[in-house]
Image (cartoon, coloured by chain):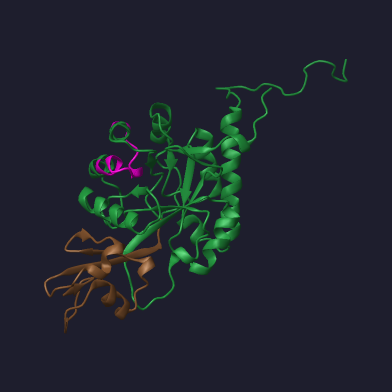
Amino acid sequence: MNFITNNNDPLILDGHTFNSRFILGSGKFSLKLIQTVMEYGGSEIATIALRRANADSPENILDFIPKNITLLPNTSGARNAEEAVRIARLSRELGCGDFVKIEVIHDSKYLLPDNEETIKATKILAKEGFIVLPYMYPDLISARKLVDAGAAAVMPLGAPIGSNRGLLTKDFIKILIEEIPLPIIVDAGIGSPSQACEAMELGASAVMANTAIATADDCASMAKAFRLAIEAGRTAYLAKLGRVLDKGAEASSPLTGFLQD
Amino acid sequence: MTVNGEFIELSSPIDLKTFLESQGYNINRIAVEINYEIIPKSTYQNVILSEKDVLEIVSFMGGG
């Protein structure tokens, strides 16, 4: 029997290794809460967004995220590849590394990503040395194009952003896990620890969540619950789930030696 | 001059570094684009602003 511990099972993104498979989005939190939530969640990667600066507000999120955390700026607000590239370059100029989560959205009702523009932006930014993590609609053909474009991972959505509705795209995420030779990070829509656990059991490499944590009553405890669920799901995936019977039953106890006859 | 979408009148020639400091920006926490071109931080004091410039001054915030 192989006994598996999570200690020797890092998440690897373009050569960078992480012990945590829980990526935390930093939106919707009060700045003072972020560090506690990150500690409870055990996250080593946090997403952040780029916006017009306000000269009147001295507080900056970078002063509230622990220094050992890898920052993953997103390109939220970008409506096409060109804008995503512009936001990514500005983010890198802020001196927080080469990671970027590409997010190209021009559908304001469902906030669904534009895979085609995302592929274009990925190609440009990967060539410029960025470690590109594209957020995408889970479509196999687009995912293959993202691989060719130089993505370091693929981030398919489970459900619309901020919806907390879970793995609505489960079957298609499974296809990506089977076919795409890059880490698959389930992003968007994951609303509960059980859903995060299920994504990991399927073989996702990591889960990203923000709204599920930020809209919980007790954000820190919910971050902890996600951490445990993600670890459980990962361990179950590595342990390989037992088989499922199509019908009938199979006794777990011996069928001989009964106290009768 | 346009700064983050708002018009600001330039009374006299001023360099980017002085302008940003006078407005209260924390230079370590921002990136600046002038007319769609990113300005490297090390050159802020050499960049003289003109009336026609369009500035974008950005920083990080919370986001998923």
> Residue A93 or A131: which is nearer the viewer?
A93
Which quarter of the figure is the N terminus of chain A placed in? top right
Q: Can residue A29 be seen in this view?
A: no
**Drawn colour of chain B?**
brown
Instruction: Decide whether residue A61 is among the magenta residues.
Output: no
x, y (%) of residue A113? Answer: 29, 47
> Residue B14 or A67: which is nearer the viewer?
B14
Q: Residue at x 31, y 65 (%)?
A: B58
Instruction: Please state if A244 lies on the left or on the right of A167 as rendered.
Output: right
Q: Which residue is drawn at 20% across and 71% down?
A: B5
Q: In which quarter of the image is residue A93?
A: bottom left
How many numbered discs sit on the rendered protein? 0
**Drawn colour of chain A?**
green
Q: Residue furthest bottom?
A: B11
Q: Which residue lies furthest to the front in this view?
A: B46
Q: In this view, does A245 lie above or below A190?
A: above
> Residue A162 or B34: which is nearer the viewer?
B34
Instruction: Please state if A260 lies on the left or on the right of B56 as rendered.
Output: right
Instruction: Decide whether residue A138 is among the magenta residues.
Output: yes
Q: Residue at x 41, y 33 (%)?
A: A182
Q: Residue at x 20, y 59 (%)?
A: B37
Q: Can residue A227 be seen in this view?
A: yes
x, y (%) of residue A26? Answer: 45, 59
x, y (%) of residue B29? Answer: 38, 66
x, y (%) of residue A176? Answer: 39, 32
Q: What stretch is highlighted in magenta?
A: A124-141
Which quarter of the figure is the C terminus of chain A placed in? top right
Q: Is residue A55 above or below residue A127?
A: below
